[in-house]
Amino acid sequence: MSEQLTALDATFLELEQADEGATMHIGGIMVFDPPPGGHVPALEDVRATIAARLALLPRYSQRLSSERTGGLAWPHWEQDARFDIRNHIRRAAIPAPGGEDELCEWAAEFFSHRLDRTRPLWEMALLEGLPEGRWGIASKTHHSLVDGVGSVGVVQLLLDPAPEGRGEHAVPLEAPDAPWEVTTPQGPGLVSDVAGAVGHIAGAAVHTALHPREAFARSLALAELIGSNEVNGSPHTTLNVPIGASRRFAVAHVRLSDVKAIGHELGGSVNDVLLAACTAGLRELMLSRGERPPEPGLRAMVPMNVRGGGEQLALGNRISSLFVDLPVAEAEPVRRLDAIVRRTSRLKTSHAALGAETMIDVASLAPPVVHSLIARSLYATRLFNITITNVPGPRGALYSLGARLHAIYPLVPLAAEHSIGIAIFSYMDEIAIGISADRDSCPDLEILLAGLESELTGLGQLAGATST
């Protein structure tokens, strides 16, 4: 039986349809240490390994019944009768000398191209030419298929917990909780057509009558969200300009233990410290452009996990968002971190999470024919300037074809008029910060990267001085 696309999943297809520059796939680069024997695995071995596990991920061999959304009904996921894994996994060589600069330049080109909607919405490439005998797998998967937290389960399913592999029926390891994971009441079901929308609204009315306290709380939360983020819109900046489809990609690195030490000595969570580093990098970028950092701050959309404990392998999207004002006008590092800690603490104890989920639930009531307009409003520059997502990955080592996974460099999508996005992914004790940017409007991406890295180094030194 085919499964219908949900309204939230459809949002990411609609964002692409509305703007030629938007690219709504998530993904990343997995870099592996040399395998036994020191040779890059054969392409057919990689294909066979992944193909053997796709039975647990049936949507990876399904395509949309329609390439576009709209009309009176959402498309369905249906089995692709022409599915051939050879169309989804290919080989690629990184130009010499194969270092991180060359890898990021290749990745930027790979991530610039949209996925083919006539096929299942994912693609991989086996990478060779990396230094020290390493090799890699680049992947991109449409956001309509899975969200960032769900992709962690997919990665673990495709990899192994030990060099010798896994048992045939073994399940993937559980990833640690997301930093801002929340559990909120489930909204009413998502609609498929106009008649379904009428039934949905009626059902919501019954639910409201039976659960007046929940309805009142959701109403207050939605009003709070609209009042704080819509009425007081995000500032206009050079980060929010029309974008093309060509991308740039860069990566910063830091140890998770070092970030935890900064938070322990100076205050704040891992997420707070990383947001402070991103804030510093964005501040440096704006100053280099002759742009005065806005006093209220740049507004970041920070996705949150709302998956239940048994949903880690569920495909589709189970996310909400918090909107955090980043204090880019503050020149002093510790004060920047303190300001972020205060703001995130207020958000986590407010109704912001419930308000964001309620906004998504309300949007889902709209029939497909008008949902695209609402989808664009949910990702408008008036709501936020930049997306910053932090997805904790596995703490234990993973393997593929006997080779140990060395690092994962993550990618976040770019919506219309959002020229920069930042994705943070931790694996074991390593954090990789992947920065995706529009190539034409961000020729100066290195300034953001340098500012971010400098902030982490400076905070680390301050934390070390504090501890002594």
Image (cartoon, rainbow, N blue to C red):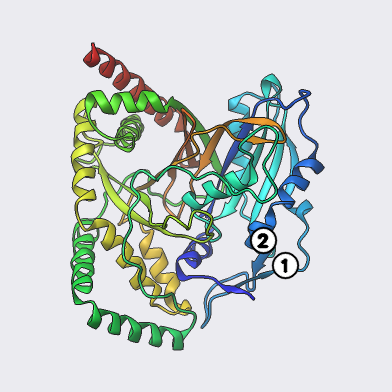
Q: Is residue 438 left or right of residue 99?
A: left
For image coordinates 64% across by 57% down, the residue present is 56
Look at the numbered disc 2 and give the secondary structure of its residue: loop
Q: Quadrant of the N terminus?
A: bottom right
Q: Is residue 291 left or right of residue 101?
A: left
Q: x, y (%) of residue 225?
A: 23, 60
Reading the image, the residue beneath label 2 is: 120
Look at the numbered disc 1 and give the secondary structure of its residue: loop
Q: x, y (%) of residue 210?
A: 24, 81
For image coordinates 24% across by 26% down, the residue present is 333
Closer to us: 85 or 331: 85
Quarter of the image for residue 66 reads: bottom right
The crowding category of the residue bearing disc 2, from other C-alpha atoms within 10 Å (few below 14, some 14 to 19, many at least 20), is many
Quarter of the image for residue 126 reads: top right
Closer to us: 348 or 108: 348
Look at label 2 and name its amino acid: Pro
Q: Earlier in the sequence, mark 1 or mark 2?
A: 1
How far apart marks 1 and 2 lie (CA) works out to 7 Å
For image coordinates 28% across by 57% down, the residue present is 353
Look at label 1 and name its amino acid: Asp
Quarter of the image for residue 293 reads: top left
Q: Is residue 374 above or below residue 423?
A: below
Closer to us: 122 or 402: 402
Q: Quadrant of the C terminus?
A: top left
For image coordinates 75% across by 42% down, the residue present is 46
Q: Is residue 67 above or below residue 196?
A: above
Closer to us: 282 or 100: 100
Task: Inspect this view and state whether residue 439 appears.
Answer: no
Q: x, y (%) of residue 169?
A: 66, 51
Q: Which mark is residue 10?
A: none
CB atoms of marks 1 and 2 within 8 Å: yes
Reading the image, the residue beneath label 1 is: 80
